[in-house]
Amino acid sequence: MQDLFFIFFSFLSIINIIIKGSDNFFDDYMELDNTNCIKGIFVWLILFCHKRSYGNNKYYIYLIIIGKLGQKVVSMFLFYSSFGICESN
């Protein structure tokens, strides 16, 4: 059941993704509106990280993925949040 939630949220995160190409990139990739969805992805990853500590020790795919990401999830969320705060002034 936990893996289904993880797959569902992963699918929701990439449902409207736009890939520009190998030599092109978006000029406004760090705009506040564009980083809100990225912060949302990291919020649910943080929730799954906290859920890991309360759950049982069964074998779930998301536990392997979250275990590999570790504290990088929190650092990226804080980076995008602090960048948005700096740009909002």
Image: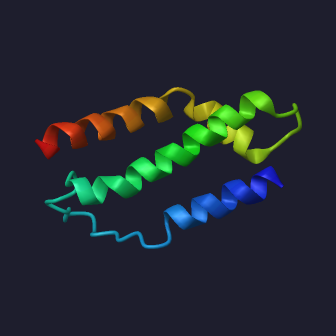
Q: Residue at x 56, y 34 (%)?
A: 69
Residue 16 lies, in percent from the top left, at 43, 73
Task: Describe residue 71's horizontal placement relative to residue 82 as left or right.
Answer: right
Residue 71 located left or right of residue 39: right
Residue occupying the far left of the picture: 89
- Residue toward you, 61 or 42: 42
- State left or right for residue 59 relative to residue 9: right
Q: Is residue 46 above or below residue 71?
A: below
Q: Is residue 21 shown above or below 77?
A: below
Q: Position of residue 11 (x, y in %)?
A: 59, 66
Quadrant the N terminus occupies: bottom right
Rendered view: 79 above or below 21:
above
Task: Say whether residue 37 is left or right of residue 14.
Answer: left
Q: Nearer the viewer, residue 80 or 19?
A: 80
Q: Position of residue 78 (x, y in %)?
A: 36, 32
Q: Residue at x 51, y 61 (%)?
A: 13
Residue at point 19% right, 55% down? 31
| Total numbered badges shown on the rendered structure | 0
* Rendering colour mode: rainbow
* Corner quadrant of residue 88: top left
Instruction: Name the quadrant containing residue 45.
Output: top right
User: Which residue does the image show at 73% across and 38% down from the upper left?
Assistant: 63
Q: Position of residue 9 (x, y in %)?
A: 61, 59
In the foreground, 81 or 58: 81
- Quarter of the image with the C terminus is top left
Task: Name the one closer to the observer, 80 or 69.
Answer: 80
